[in-house]
Image (cartoon, helix red, strand yellow):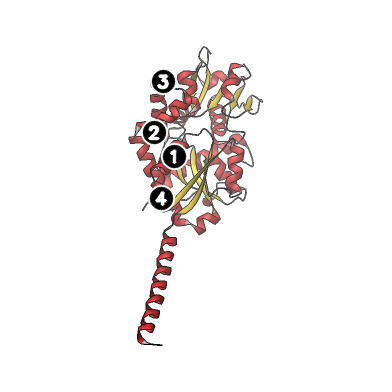
Amino acid sequence: MKPNARRRTTLAVLAACAMTAALGTARAQEPVKVRLGDLAQSLNAIASNAMIKQGYDKKHGIAVEYTVYPTLDGLFTAIRSKQVDVGFGGWTAFAQFRSKGFPVTMFFPVGRGVTLDVIAPKGSPFKTLGDLKGRKVGSYAGAAGTATVLFRVLTSRYYGYDPAKTNDLQYAGPGLLPSLIEKNEVAAALLFDPLAAKAIASGPFRSVVNLADVYKEKVGEDFLWIGVASNDDFIAQQPAALSGFVRAWIEAVAYVKGNPEVFAPYSKALALDAAGTSMLRERVLADYTTTWNDETIRSLGRFAKMANEVMGGGFLDEVPAAAFTTRFNPK
């Protein structure tokens, strides 16, 4: 081979190697897909959509695919069966899953329950949870949902009755509960935002009590309601993606707090006026929490003991250490 031909061949090989290396680097830098599951009509959507629209997910090396499920059962099935990589839900459900052998771990908090209201008609006489004794009450959260458990703990420990034991609890999808009240099929209903805010601001309803407020008053500490969890396989395979998710979520929450306009689409969809929109924003911002440490987890253990006393054997008999982790907190 002539020298010039040899030189051209060498350059071609080097160019091909450089291109291959560049393609490999580009692939290595592609964001990791993270399938995120949520309950339809959940306030978590506000920060989730901000995360995606503002590009915080890509900034931290992930590409979030947001999917909603019409029922909690559907969402929890998706989380347990790994149809989603991470999912929102009540922390008691995640702890219960882990205790029953499902490899689910909560890795960050989301909501404190500030938007968990028991609503009733505006003209109803109810003033406290005690006034609902013997009345039919609806709950969107199902028999073992965190909100239902909180409701039962409060009524059992501080008001002398357990509506589940007297068959006074009725479960239905969140969108159906206001109509059940209007039809007098239930006297009141446990609901969450944005639907609770809509019912209170623009519907014929009022809030009897806020469950987080009652818990704070009776127990003396804040309640933690919603968290985000993943499964053992994804945790082992993509730990950096989960760290990126936490960072992206924190930035998304900060963005929501600083940009009131993000509430406009939700306000329009709910047909809220200015006062209703302000109420929704105030409640959502008060609900979001990013405090997650060992003391927070210990507070969950304290509630778990109360819940076990009320719910009975088989529900949170133990809270495995693997049910929670702070390893993905920003360092």
Disc 1 and disc 2 in contact, CB within 8 angstroms: yes
| Disc on the earlier residue, 4 or 1 | 1
| Disc on the earlier residue, 1 or 2 | 1
Disc 4 and disc 1 in contact, CB within 8 angstroms: no
State the residue position of label 4.
58
* Residue 329 seen in this snapshot: no
Q: CA distance from mark 1 to mark 3?
A: 22 Å
State the residue position of label 2.
262
For disc 3, the neighbor class at 10 Å (few under 14, some 14 to 19, many from 20) is: some
Disc 2 and disc 3 in contact, CB within 8 angstroms: no
Q: CA distance from mark 4 to mark 2?
A: 20 Å
Q: Determine whether, in the image, residue 274 is placed left or right of residue 90.
A: left
| Residue at screen point 55% across, 44% down | 94
Under mark 2, the amino acid is Val
State the residue position of label 3.
273
State the residue position of label 1.
49
Under mark 4, the amino acid is Lys
